[in-house]
Amino acid sequence: WLQTGVALEFFAAFAECRLLASMSPPPSHWTDIAARAAGLPSVQFLLHHLGWVKVGSVETSTRLSSRLAASNQPNICIKISGVHCASARFGYFPVPDTAEILGQLVATLGARRLPMGSDFPASVGTVTYSQPLGVPRTLLPAFTAADRALLMGGNLARTIDETRPFDLRAMSS
């Protein structure tokens, strides 16, 4: 679908309206998303839940990370959410087995393209509210305070500001 004219028309409307393309695609769609992002550089693409890369498929995650790196599309971000879903030990925290996936995403995308996201309400009963918030501290220990500030709100605030269809500040004056 992402390669069709209908998809181009769909995402062109996002560009025209300055909307964020917030998506939850499986890894098999990353190449098509990178191609679409290259053709529409003004559209910000936000992929959810680590891009659905899972522990145990390191070969797959390596291949996908290199595809994204090769695409060099600054308008693709991957949300750090659903970390417990990527783990071989679903629902257990901490999830140290996901550190390699997070490390690959950081190496490929850098701290500026990784916003932190909520796992709720979908994760109620699986993890606590505070467990996902501990991910930067426990699984990304090399992150600086500035990196953590980007991850914990700065990146998403910048993305929203870049995709805002109108200036809210101008409307309030």
Image (spheres, rainbow, N blue to C red):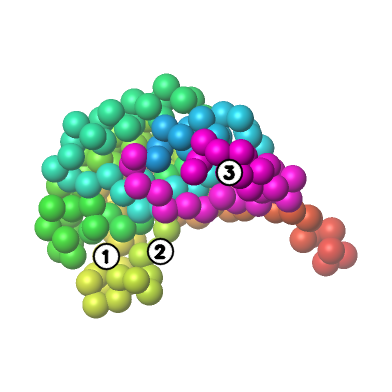
Instruction: State yes or no: discs 3 and 2 in contact (Cβ < 8 Å).
Output: no
Viewer-side label of 2, 1: 2
Residue 111: % across, % down: 43, 38
How many numbered markers are drawn? Answer: 3
User: What residue is rendered at 25% in x and 40% in y?
Assistant: 101
Kind of residue sitting beneath label 1:
Gln
Extreme-bottom residue of the structure: 125
How packed mark 2 is, by other alpha carbons closer than 10 Å (few <14, some 14-19, many 20 or more), is some
Q: Give the CA separation, mark 1 to mark 3.
A: 37 Å
Residue 157: % across, % down: 58, 53
- First in sequence: mark 2 or mark 1? 2
- The disc at residue 118 is 2
How packed mark 3 is, by other alpha carbons closer than 10 Å (few <14, some 14-19, many 20 or more), is few
Kind of residue sitting beneath label 2:
Ser
Secondary structure at numbered mark 3: helix
Is 5 contained in the magenta span? yes
Is 112 contained in the magenta span? no
Secondary structure at numbered mark 2: loop
Q: On screen, 30 above or below 10?
A: above
Instruction: State yes or no: discs 1 and 3 in contact (Cβ < 8 Å).
Output: no
User: What residue is rendered at 24% in x and 77% in y?
Assistant: 125
Q: Nearer the viewer, residue 18 or 153?
A: 18
Query: Label 3 belongs to which residue?
Result: 7
First to last magenta residue range: 1-28
Instruction: State yes or no: discs 2 and 1 in contact (Cβ < 8 Å).
Output: no
- First in sequence: mark 3 or mark 2? 3
